[in-house]
Amino acid sequence: MPDIEALIAAHVRDVPDYPQAGVLFKDITPLLGDADAFGDVIEAMAAIFGPVDKVVGIEARGFILAAPVAYEIRAGFVPVRKKGKLPSATFAQEYDLEYGSAVLEVHQDAFAAGDRVLIVDDVLATGGTARATASLIQRAGAQVVGIAVLMELSFLKGREAVGDLEVRSLLTV
């Protein structure tokens, strides 16, 4: 496997002032468009934590990474979506972003009691999304084993927001 940090850094572009002024957006579409790089990243993310029952992907870019990670490790995939996007009874959790606030939901029957769950997302920024997702999983009776992210924006101190949950990142900037 190539140096995963260098591979990610070479395939992620910065987009200034998106989605609003002052935000430096990390665009992963060049990485996704390179089959070899994308495959290497999925394999690396799948190797981060031990066996789990479910992998949660956070809307929307988290879906792109979490579903193939779940497939790679033969775990179930659970989407955590923005409010109003899931068709059955849900748990909801409000959270803050680096540029606003939102609500996430998960199906109430997405997990069995005691399921070991891995959260996968593209970026850990302020940690609000990850913390809200962990809260949803715990409310549903499952155990969060950790958070795996493609990259961590360390200057936003997202690790502080997720408390004692273990975070593993393929690239920290």
Image (cartoon, helix red, strand yellow):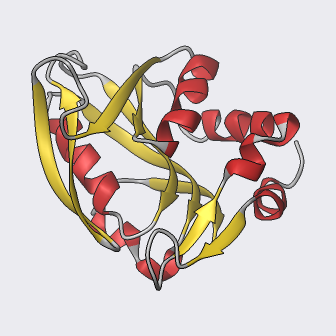
Q: Position of residue 11 (x, y in %)?
A: 79, 57
Quarter assignment of residue 112:
top left
Residue 138 in view in this figure:
yes
| Image point (53%, 23%), residue name | 70
Front residue of 120 and 26: 26
Q: Quadrant of the C terminus?
A: bottom right
Query: Is 79 placed left or right of 18 in the picture?
Result: left
In the picture shown, does residue 128 fall above or below 34? below
Front residue of 173 and 1: 173
Residue 173 in view in this figure:
no
Query: Is 132 placed left or right of 48 in the picture?
Result: left
| Image point (53%, 72%), residue name | 153
Q: Position of residue 32 (x, y in %)?
A: 72, 42
Query: Is 1 placed left or right of 45 in the picture?
Result: right
Q: Position of residue 117 (x, y in %)?
A: 36, 31
Q: Quadrant of the N terminus?
A: top right
In the picture shown, does residue 77 fall above or below 163? above
Number of labels in the image equals 0
In the picture shown, does residue 92 fall above or below 14? above
Front residue of 12 and 149: 12
Q: Position of residue 109 (x, y in %)?
A: 17, 16
| Image point (55%, 14%), residue name | 74
